[in-house]
Image (cartoon, grey):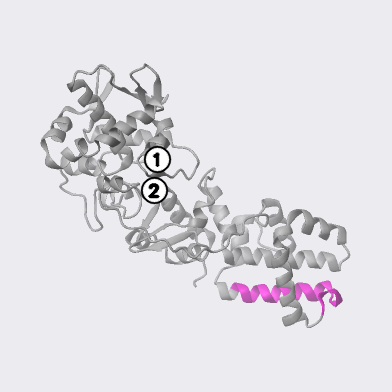
Amino acid sequence: MPNSTPAILEPILAHLIHWGELSRVEARWLKADAGLALLASGSLVHAVAGAWLIGSNLERLFPASNLEDIWQKVCFSLPTYQAYLINLAAGEIARRGLEGAGDLVDQWVVTSFPHQVPAFNAFLDQIEQNDLHKPLIESSPGALVQAVQRFIQLQEKASGLDFAAWNQALLSVSAPTEAVFQAALARGALTDQSIDPVNEVFEPSPIQDLNTELAKPCGRWVLCPNLDHPNPMQHPDLAIDPAWHKRSYVFSSVPLLDNGDNGMNLTQEQVQTAFCQHPLSWIIIQLGLHIQIQATTGSNKILHLALERNPDGALCDLHIELPDNSIRHLSEAVPSLVRGLGLELILPYGQLSLAALGSWLEALLQAELLEVSRGEVFLSETFGRTVFASKYFQLLVKNPKLWRKRLVEILKGE
């Protein structure tokens, strides 16, 4: 394995946490082979046909406070680096014991690292048998330090990692050994970071069509990423923007482009069809359809939708007024609405980003799926006509009738 630094993991993790899936094509763009191999060694990513997905051990690290937080947790939990830190710590603790600091050793072992004692003992047994050739208690502190250094050098060569570079990046020190140990101790890098590799046996089936998925819900992941550029019809470099590429195994981007498509000469219907294939925009469209159908039948028990903006004027939420005049917000209701469809909303940072939700609302306006009239939000007049005239879009009206009813029940708290 080539010499790899922690920095190579940042763009991979940023992409995975944002989109939930890294295609093989995107992996080549990111030159991610070495980083993916490191992540796979700890079951932090999972390879499937044509893509890499968030692995079970990466999911365990959610929610994180930010990308740097999860990056550090990932780096500390990688089996190779974690083994190095454990071995280094075992050598330092044993050295202090040989120097007579028994109380300090007991404090570390009993209070700080009780879960690491088996790993410490296994490493020290190796050192005794293969290098010291006598009981550890009969060795000098200097001989132990040299034996540990030789072992770590072999470990570094075998792994292809420059441990000094990793220590500098993650602990802000590179040497000497005692400083690295103290920094790891202060950062909590040895407390509970280690995670066992898992043999992932699940092989998810590729997404076919959202209506098909809803007929047999399987808990497929849904993400709500920020769409940095909400108008694909005016995007100068649509082909290189992950927001518009089809995902094979998770619902995250708007599934508009296949690999190799350049995004030129798109029709408005293509864009609108793609939005109808993501559960978040599908839910909003279904609420608009509910309002339109109820209004057509003369019912006075309809929803009222309105856009909300943050102090800077950017869209951030959808205000939902129910027939009993109670108020819900889409941001608060989305997890329940997605679960109600038999899907699972993934929030790596523990909460829905209002900026991301606002970008979806803006994109639906830009694609002329929604429009604002007299302060309220409706399906756009042109899209409304298309829905009832187009054979494809009729699937939005007829097939999901029960789902649409369920969404309204969830909003009502029923």
Q: Main secondary structure of the magenta part?
A: helix
* Magenta part of the chain: 135-156
* Residue 104 shows up from this direction: yes
The residue where tag 1 is placed is 339
Looking at the rendered structure, the kind of residue marked 1 is Arg
User: Circle 2: is it few (<14), some (14-19), or many (20+) Cα within 10 Å?
Assistant: some
Q: Residue at x 33, y 33 (%)?
A: 406
Q: Residue at x 86, y 77 (%)?
A: 138
The secondary structure type at the circle numbered 1 is helix
Q: Earlier in the sequence, mark 2 or mark 1?
A: 2
| Of residues 314 and 130, the one drawn nearer to the viewer in this rendering | 130
Left or right: 302 in relation to 175: left
| Of residues 221 and 405, the one drawn nearer to the viewer in this rendering | 405
Query: Which quadrant would the C terminus be assigned to in this image?
Result: top left
What's the mark number on residue 219? 2
User: Circle 1: is it few (<14), some (14-19), or many (20+) Cα within 10 Å?
Assistant: some
Does 373 appear above or below 409?
A: above
Does 369 appear above or below 161?
A: above
| Of residues 310 and 211, the one drawn nearer to the viewer in this rendering | 211
x, y percent for residue 393: 17, 39
